[in-house]
Amino acid sequence: MRRIFLVSSILALIAVACSPATVGGSPRVVATTTILGDITTNVVDECGPLVTTLMPIGQDPHAFQPSANQAATMQTADLVIANGLDLEQGLDDVLASAEREGVPVLRVAEQLDPVPFGRHFSATERPTSPGTLDPHVWLDPIRMADGVELITAAAIDQMPDLEACITESGDTYRDAVVTTHQRIEDILSVVPDERRVLVTNHDSLGYFADRYRFTILGTVVPSGSTLAEPSPSDLRELVDIMRSARADVIFAETTEPARLAEAVAAELGYPVDVVELYTGSLGAPGSGADTYLGLLETDARRIADALGR
């Protein structure tokens, strides 16, 4: 009931909001996550539109709730770039309200050939949420190269007078994403086949695993959302799976506390590294993950350092 009341209050405030659709005559594009914000900025920023990113750095997109001002910003945008597939659960009602008001909303993940959770798991681990589509498409740069094309096309649709500039920027950035994929393959080449096994905090690395030939051995939180909570039996099962495979690395996430991963590691009775990855959010300036392309390379290097031995 509290969430319904909060959303209703936000939508009521939107109804009386008078924010203009443009700022200083410039079109306004709103992106939900920091990752989509960086990608969208690279596509349109030099061409004139102002890009607003709703979520702050370090925010878990599964848990984000917008303020009234942020909801009003979406309601008056010229274009909203969202992930979709229930990643931004706290934005669903506000996005739907914006669409009813005529705001174009591009849900990128829904158009990038999403696949169900579980196809990348080893035979020893049960799939997470079988049949539910995995929203974490940005961790496959080849898919997101196509996502850049979707964002470019959506921006041109809303700002046709900027078509030449947006097309050039979009093409240049798409090439950079593909080049980053090639660098990731080189970085991960040091990981032998028998070490291409991942234990993760929640089920977020499926697309990465598929693209770079890894297997997901298990997850600390047996869900595609960080909002779920593992039971004691879930954690015991993961300990048994890791012990049987002699797995010695757990990949945690910068957007979530690592205490559960550390607790699992402590139960195994042999040295286990807990390594943080940037999954749902960019990193702070200077982290090496403060851009989308930097995030991909930083994660690849951390995985290679942990498993390439």
Image (cartoon, rainbow, N blue to C red):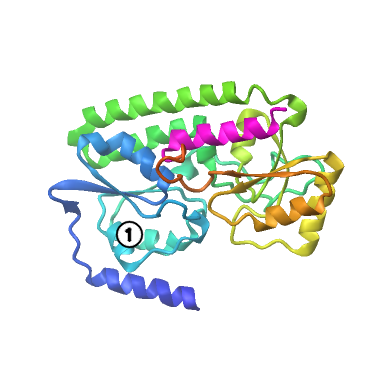
Residue behind mark 1: 98
Report x, y in % for residue 241: 82, 47
Report x, y in % for residue 59: 47, 55
Report x, y in % for residue 93: 42, 64
Q: Is residue 250 above or below residue 149?
A: below
Residue 222 visible to an observer of this rendering: no
Predominant secondary structure in magenta? helix
Magenta region includes residue 123? no
Q: Residue furthest right?
A: 244
Give the quadrant of residue 205: top right
What segment carries the magenta color? 290-309
Magenta region includes residue 292? yes
Report x, y in % for residue 187: 58, 24
Residue visible at 77% across and 53% down in the picture: 266
Give the quadrant of residue 308: top right
Q: Secondary structure at mark 1?
A: helix
